[in-house]
Image: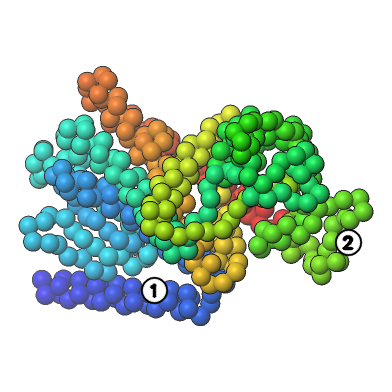
C-alpha cells in the first residue's frame, strides 16, 4: 500500500515538473521569440485551448445545474498533474500537462454507463429540454466569450462603421467613372445583400462570370441607382492592405514596383472597383455594446451564408482555412503595425474563431452538438428512444468526414503556403 502511494506521489511530482517545464517553455517562447514560427504555433494552440475549454465549461455548468453526474472536468490534455475534489462534489477536477484544450466527461451522454450510479443522474435520462440546454451551453459560452472580447476591443481601441457606406472613391477608378460618391450606401452586390462590410467582403469572394460588378446604391437623399462597375487591377501593400496604384498599360506592375522601391513579395494584386470605406474608430460605452452585439450577429449570420454558398458551389474550398491557414493568419495579424495593433488583431481573431466554433457546433451534422440535438429531436417526434448503435455509427461517419475535410483543407493550405 505504501509502495503504491509512493508511486502515485512520484508520478504526480513528475507530472508537476513536466507542467512547470511546459509553462516556462511557453513563457520563454512568447517573450524571447516573438513572431517566429514556434511563437505563432504556440499562440494558435493557446487560442484554441481557451476556446475549447470555454466551450466544455458551458456543457459542464449546465450539466451540474441539472444534476447530471460529471466524472471529470479537465483543463488541458495528456497526463494528469493536479487532481482535486470539492466537498460533497463527486466530480474530479484535473489540470493536465498539455495546454491544448480540455474536456468534461458526463455520465450517460448516450446511454447508462455505470451500474453504481442512480438512474436519475444520467444525462440520457434527464428531461429532453434539459438535455437540449446542456448540448447548446457550449455554443452559448463561445458566443458569450466573443461578445465580451468584441466589447473590450471597442472600449479600448474603438470601433469603425460596420455599414457598407462608401468612405471614399479612388481617383481614376471605375467607381468614380460611373458616378459612385462618398456617402453612398451599398445595398446589393451582384444580386446578393451586402448592407454591411462583412457581407460585402464575402460576396466579393464568390465565383463570378466576368470582371463586372453590379452595385445597387442608395444615395444620401434616399434615391437608389444600379451601377455596373468594371474591376481594375490594383497593386496593394501585402502587409498593410493599402492601395499603392492602379495597373494600366502605361503603368504596369514592374514600373509600380520600381517607382516605390518594392519587390514582388511586398505586394499583392487584386481586382477592385475602387471603393474605400471609413476605418476611423470611435469609442464609447454604449457604442461598444452596440458594436459587440451587431458585429456578433453579422459574423454569425455571415458564417451561415458561407456554408450555404459552399453547398451551392458559389464559394470554393479556397475560402476555408485549416490549422495551417490559421497559422498564416496569426503570422500576418501580429506582424502588422505596432504591438498594440497586433494585440488588437489577436483578440479580434479569437472572437471571430469563437463565433466560428459556435456556429459549426450548432450545425445539424453528426459529431457536432447540433447532431446530438437532432437525435433528441427524433426522440421528441417519435416519442421513443433512438437506437444507440445507429447513433454511434452515424457519429463515427461524421467524425471520419470531418477529419477527411480537415486533411483536404490542410493540404490546400500547405500547397498555398509553399506555392
Of residues 72 and 222, which is closer to you in this image? Answer: 222
Its colouring scheme is rainbow
Residue at 78 percent of width and 51 percent of height: 171
Residue at 15 percent of width and 43 percent of height: 66
Residue 52 x/y as whole percent: 37, 54
- Of all residues, the one furthest to the top in this rendering is 382
Residue 393 x/y as whole percent: 37, 33
Q: Nearer the viewer, mark 2 or mark 1?
A: 2
Residue 359 x/y as whole percent: 42, 41
Residue 30 appears in the figure: yes
Residue of label 2? 255
Report whether 204 appears left or right of 29. right
Asked where in the image residue 164 lies, by quadrant, the reply is top right
Q: Quadrant of the N terminus?
A: bottom left
Residue at 19 percent of width and 52 percent of height: 71
Residue at 34 percent of width and 77 percent of height: 20
Q: Sort mark 2 into few (<14), some (14-19) or many (20+) by Cα contacts within 10 Å.
A: few
| Separation (CA) of disc 2 from disc 1 | 51 Å
Disc 2 element: helix
First-in-chain label (2 vs 1): 1
Disc 1 element: helix
Picture layout, residue 217 above or below residue 277: above
The numbered disc on residue 22 is 1
Residue 41 x/y as whole percent: 51, 65
Of residues 64 and 170, which is closer to you in this image? Answer: 170
Report whether 79 appears left or right of 303. left
Of residues 119 and 261, which is closer to you in this image? Answer: 261
Q: Sort mark 1 into few (<14), some (14-19) or many (20+) by Cα contacts within 10 Å.
A: some
Amino acid at each position: 500500500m505504501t509502495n503504491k502511494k509512493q508511486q502515485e506521489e512520484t508520478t504526480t511530482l513528475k507530472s508537476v515538473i513536466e507542467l512547470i517545464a511546459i509553462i516556462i517553455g511557453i513563457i520563454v517562447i512568447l517573450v524571447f521569440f516573438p513572431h517566429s514560427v514556434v511563437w505563432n504555433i504556440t499562440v494558435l494552440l493557446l487560442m484554441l485551448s481557451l476556446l475549447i475549454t470555454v466551450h466544455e465549461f458551458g456543457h459542464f455548468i449546465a450539466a451540474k445545474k441539472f444534476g447530471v453526474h460529471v466524472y471529470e472536468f479537465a483543463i488541458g490534455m495528456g497526463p494528469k498533474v493536479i487532481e482535486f475534489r470539492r466537498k460533497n462534489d463527486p466530480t474530479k477536477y484535473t489540470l493536465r500537462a498539455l495546454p491544448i484544450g480540455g474536456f468534461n466527461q458526463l455520465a450517460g451522454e448516450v446511454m447508462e454507463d455505470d451500474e453504481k450510479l442512480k438512474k436519475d443522474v444520467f444525462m440520457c435520462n434527464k428531461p429532453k429540454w434539459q438535455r437540449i440546454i446542456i448540448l447548446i451551453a457550449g455554443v452559448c459560452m463561445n458566443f458569450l466569450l466573443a461578445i465580451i472580447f468584441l466589447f473590450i476591443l471597442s472600449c479600448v481601441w474603438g470601433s469603425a462603421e460596420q455599414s457598407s457606406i462608401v468612405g471614399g472613391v479612388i481617383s481614376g477608378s471605375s467607381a468614380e467613372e460611373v458616378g459612385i460618391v462618398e456617402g453612398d450606401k451599398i445595398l446589393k452586390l451582384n444580386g446578393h445583400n451586402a448592407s454591411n462590410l462583412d457581407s460585402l467582403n464575402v460576396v466579393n469572394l464568390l465565383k463570378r462570370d466576368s470582371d463586372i460588378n453590379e452595385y445597387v446604391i442608395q444615395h444620401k437623399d434616399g434615391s437608389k441607382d444600379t451601377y455596373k462597375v468594371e474591376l481594375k487591377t490594383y497593386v496593394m501593400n501585402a502587409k498593410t492592405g493599402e492601395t499603392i496604384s492602379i495597373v494600366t498599360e502605361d503603368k504596369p506592375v514592374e514600373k509600380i514596383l520600381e517607382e516605390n522601391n518594392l519587390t514582388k513579395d511586398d505586394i499583392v494584386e487584386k481586382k477592385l472597383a475602387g471603393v474605400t470605406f471609413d476605418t476611423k474608430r470611435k469609442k464609447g460605452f454604449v457604442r461598444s455594446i452596440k458594436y459587440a452585439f451587431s458585429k456578433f450577429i453579422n459574423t454569425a449570420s455571415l458564417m451561415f451564408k458561407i456554408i450555404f454558398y459552399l453547398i451551392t458551389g458559389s464559394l470554393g474550398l479556397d475560402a476555408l482555412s485549416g490549422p495551417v491557414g490559421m497559422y498564416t493568419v496569426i503570422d500576418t495579424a501580429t506582424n502588422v503595425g505596432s504591438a498594440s495593433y497586433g494585440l488588437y488583431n489577436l483578440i479580434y481573431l479569437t472572437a471571430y474563431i469563437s463565433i466560428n466554433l459556435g456556429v459549426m457546433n450548432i450545425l445539424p451534422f453528426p459529431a457536432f452538438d447540433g447532431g446530438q440535438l437532432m437525435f433528441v429531436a427524433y426522440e421528441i417526434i417519435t416519442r421513443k428512444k433512438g437506437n444507440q448503435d445507429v447513433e454511434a455509427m452515424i457519429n463515427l461517419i461524421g467524425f471520419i468526414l470531418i477529419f477527411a475535410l480537415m486533411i483536404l483543407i490542410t493540404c490546400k493550405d500547405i500547397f498555398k503556403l509553399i506555392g
